[in-house]
Amino acid sequence: IRLIRSMQSFAVASMLLSMLCMLSIFQEWEGLGYSLFFLALVMMIISLTISLWEIQLSTQALNLQLELLEQSGSPLGASRR
């Protein structure tokens, strides 16, 4: 849950920085706009990296759970064979 919350927080921050970037460019503050856009990209890269990490952890946990079901001889494990 903590990883998902972090991922979403970085994604939201990225979107907010992108909007501030557009506002800055509209106001002809190009230097600020470029800086905000760079920060938005960094935040999105962090968010996507956390997302990939969370997917890996979830997949490993699911595989472990499936192995345990198969070993226990439960009906769910037997139907997978």
Image (cartoon, rainbow, N blue to C red):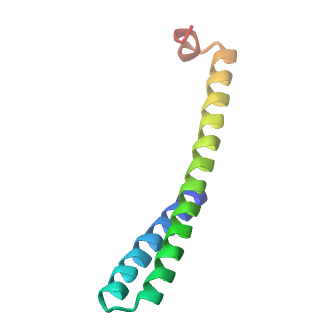
Q: Nearer the viewer, residue 38 or 56?
A: 38
- Percent across and percent down for residue 6 are 56, 64
Q: Up-down: is 64 above or below 77?
A: below
Task: Choose top left, top right, bottom left or bottom right for residue 81.
Answer: top right
Q: Quadrant of the N terminus?
A: bottom right
- Percent across and percent down for residue 49 are 60, 55
- Percent across and percent down for residue 36 are 48, 81
In the image, is 16 to the left or to the right of 27?
A: right
Q: Up-down: is 20 above or below 15?
A: below
Q: Residue at x 51, y 82 (%)?
A: 35
In the image, is 24 to the left or to the right of 79?
A: left
- Percent across and percent down for residue 27 are 31, 92
Q: Nearer the viewer, residue 54 or 40?
A: 40
Q: Residue at x 44, y 78 (%)?
A: 17
Q: Nearer the viewer, residue 71 or 38?
A: 38
Q: Residue at x 60, y 60 (%)?
A: 2
